[in-house]
């Protein structure tokens, strides 16, 4: 089925596949060069028998079409496809709406799904800095203490609720106060592993796509009407925008829930990679790999990204296992988004790795870290180097990093501050703007759990309060917040989020995964510290600079002793002036305090282990200044 010849013969570049529905017409169009016959069935709902059936008309390039001079908005449909004499029923891989649990597609006049005011919805103006907050829709409001009404808990609608300030701010009120700029939502296209008609206590991260262009139903308040999930998903995005936050979608184009997908039923064998022995390749460790690199696979993925960006007003995309996709496809998506929305307007980044090898199409390059030099400068990737040097290896539970007892990491930490632009990692990015700095994400232990595991012996109580762990947490945050590049944190990292030592909670109970809003009070000091780091970061040209020249601002990098490093940064902005001309940063991962002598000039303390975004003047130049054990300090030199 695959092969260059097939690809060239049947490549279809129109972006009208699916069911295009306006108030006067509905046009069904699918692509299947191998089908002998395709029949469309229409249904009143997700379960009753078809009320209408008609054979599709074949056109050029393997396209099948059927046109109606009426609006079929809200009508469900599927296809009976005959290939090699055998018939299979399938939903539409290009569908924009679907039934409960996604087995039938739905024709949707998308304009009828816009919530009031959506046509004028726009992303907030781009901040100087990008601080990305990784959040799961259910985690956000599942906690009863969220203050969100029961009917909306765990749903898209929770984002539209204001006034959840009881004794303390929660949900949207809390996000607004934190200072983050982007909310990155775990997958919310339609995924398969949660029964949408089942109870509220089911849970999944959602990395198992069923309908790529439809929002997930279990986050909607009514799953029996396929338009509700679309409208409520838009309401969520609109609410985030209205509160000053940009929205990033986590997308999983590298595999499908199972091989027997709508894509497979439409054109068997075309959309997946196979080993030489005919077995499915499994570079995703999820049972199958989508064959990015083939023309109609690439068209499908690129069109899907553009669809979400346009129809749902999304501001960026995070690619799961980007290393299974190709450099060519990623660069194409970057280009198409730039042409449509303006250069760099939409953020693009991904995981530059894959779970295992995967047979790529001839002439294509995997979008892996090793091929980063071929990726457009506007495509970012997670820096596992930054993550692991700060807190220790993600899979070696007891292995510490710089802040929690690791040794011989000083030189590496000093490379991390440049976004690895001056070496030290297996890849040198084109600019620090390509680097996503982070120390925790949904995968692996939360930062708190990792620190407890490495700093406590035996049976650790993850709910305990440990001052030394808190100090290490603050130092970890201080370090990546003073590294050049983009910033990313897992929701709740700033209030010591624990999953009680579970490192792979993708289908654990919602109670294990949810944000516990009470913890924002219990760990108010830590939350305030993160808020201070966020606010300070936005004021510092040395760290907001994402250009290839940013690393040149860093000088006099020094290892002062075991566990103690320091560096200085040119902090002038483009006009040559700023409140602080130069920054002096010290990381003290040792247990004891360390005294450094201050360089010439008038210095102010901008952050230390206790507070961030302060402004305390130091008296005389040249005087020594003491940095507490397990803490960082940033000083700013005032201009003349
Ligand atoms: Ca679903």
Image (tube, grey):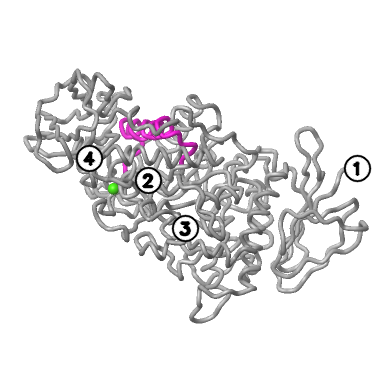
Q: Which residue is mark 2?
A: 188
Comes first in the chain, label 2 or label 4: 2
Q: Which secondary structure, mark 2?
A: loop
Q: Which secondary structure, mark 3?
A: helix
Q: Is mark 4 within 8 Å of ligand 1?
A: no
Comes first in the chain, label 2 or label 3: 3
Q: Which residue is mark 1?
A: 640
Spatial distance from mark 4 to mark 3, Cα to Cα? 38 Å
Determine if the magenta segment contains residue 306: yes
Which residue is outermost to the left?
85
Query: Is residue 109 visible to the viewer in this orientation of the structure?
Result: yes
Q: Is residue 336 left or right of residue 560?
A: left
Spatial distance from mark 2 to mark 4, Cα to Cα? 18 Å
User: Which one is in front in this view, the residue at disc 3 or the one at disc 1?
Assistant: 3
Q: Which residues are magenta?
A: 290-317
Spatial distance from mark 2 to mark 1, Cα to Cα? 52 Å
Q: Residues within 10 Å of mark 2 (few under 14, many from 20)?
A: many
The quadrant in which the C terminus is found is top right
User: Which one is in front in this view, the residue at disc 2 or the one at disc 4?
Assistant: 2
Q: Residues within 10 Å of mark 4 (few under 14, many from 20)?
A: many
Q: Is mark 2 within 8 Å of ligand 1?
A: no
What is the quadrant of residue 399 in the picture? bottom right
Q: Which residue is mark 4?
A: 262
């Amino acid at each position: 089925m695959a092969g260059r010849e097939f690809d060239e013969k049947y490549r279809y570049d129109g972006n009208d596949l699916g069911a295009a529905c306006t108030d006067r017409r509905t046009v069904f169009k699918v692509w299947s060069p191998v089908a002998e016959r395709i029949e469309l069935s229409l249904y009143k709902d997700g379960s009753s028998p078809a009320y209408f059936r008609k054979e599709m008309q074949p056109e050029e390039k393997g396209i099948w079409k059927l046109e109606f001079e009426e609006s079929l908005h809200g009508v469900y449909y599927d296809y009976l496809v005959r290939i090699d004499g055998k018939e299979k029923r399938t939903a539409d891989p290009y569908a924009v709406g679907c039934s409960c649990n996604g087995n039938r597609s739905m024709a949707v006049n998308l304009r009828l799904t816009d919530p009031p005011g959506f046509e004028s919805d726009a992303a907030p103006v781009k901040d100087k800095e990008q601080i990305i907050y990784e959040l799961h829709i259910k985690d956000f409001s599942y906690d009863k203490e969220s203050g969100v009404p029961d009917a909306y808990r765990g749903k898209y609608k929770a984002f539209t609720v204001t006034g959840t300030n009881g004794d303390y701010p929660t949900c949207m009120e809390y996000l607004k106060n934190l200072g983050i700029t982007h909310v990155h939502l775990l997958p919310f296209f339609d995924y398969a592993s949660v029964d949408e008609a089942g109870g509220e206590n089911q849970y999944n991260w959602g990395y198992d796509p069923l309908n790529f262009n439809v929002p997930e139903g279990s986050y909607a308040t009514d799953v029996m009407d396929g338009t509700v999930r679309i409208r409520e998903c838009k309401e969520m995005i609109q609410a985030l925008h209205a509160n000053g936050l940009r929205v990033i979608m986590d997308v999983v184009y590298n595999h499908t829930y199972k091989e027997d997908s709508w894509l497979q039923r439409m054109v068997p064998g075309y959309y997946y990679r196979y080993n030489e022995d005919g077995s499915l390749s499994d570079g995703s460790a999820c049972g199958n790999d989508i064959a990015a690199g083939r023309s109609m696979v690439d068209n499908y993925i690129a069109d899907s990204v553009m669809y979400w960006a346009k129809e749902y007003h999304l501001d960026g995309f995070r690619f799961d296992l980007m290393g299974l996709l190709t450099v060519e496809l990623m660069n194409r998506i970057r280009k198409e988004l730039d042409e449509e929305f303006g250069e760099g307007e939409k953020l693009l980044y991904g995981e530059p790795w894959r779970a295992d090898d995967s047979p790529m199409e001839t002439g294509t390059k995997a979008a892996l870290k090793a091929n980063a030099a071929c990726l457009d400068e506007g495509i970012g990737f997670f820096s596992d180097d930054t993550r692991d040097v700060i807190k220790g290896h993600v899979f070696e539970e007891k292995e510490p990093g710089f802040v929690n007892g690791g040794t011989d990491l000083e030189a590496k930490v000093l490379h991390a501050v440049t976004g690895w632009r001056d070496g030290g990692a297996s890849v040198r990015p084109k600019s620090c703007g390509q680097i996503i700095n982070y120390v925790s994400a949904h995968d692996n232990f939360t930062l708190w759990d990792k620190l407890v595991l490495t700093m406590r012996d035996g049976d650790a109580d993850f709910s305990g309060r440990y001052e030394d762990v808190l100090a290490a947490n603050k130092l970890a945050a201080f370090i990546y917040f003073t590294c050049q590049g983009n910033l990313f944190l897992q929701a709740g990292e700033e209030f010591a989020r624990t999953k009680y030592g579970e490192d792979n909670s993708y289908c654990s109970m919602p109670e294990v995964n949810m944000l516990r809003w009470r913890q924002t009070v219990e760990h108010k000091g830590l939350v305030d510290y993160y808020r201070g780091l966020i606010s300070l970061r936005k004021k510092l040209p040395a760290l907001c600079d994402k250009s290839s020249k940013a690393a040149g601002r860093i000088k006099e990098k020094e290892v002062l002793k075991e566990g103690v490093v320091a560096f200085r940064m040119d902090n002038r902005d483009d006009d040559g002036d700023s409140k602080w001309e130069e920054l002096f940063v010290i990381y003290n991962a040792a247990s004891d305090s360390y005294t450094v002598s201050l360089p010439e000039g008038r210095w102010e303390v901008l952050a230390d282990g206790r507070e961030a975004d302060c402004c305390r003047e130091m008296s005389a130049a040249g005087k020594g200044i003491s940095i507490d054990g397990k803490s960082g300090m940033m000083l700013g030199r005032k201009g003349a």
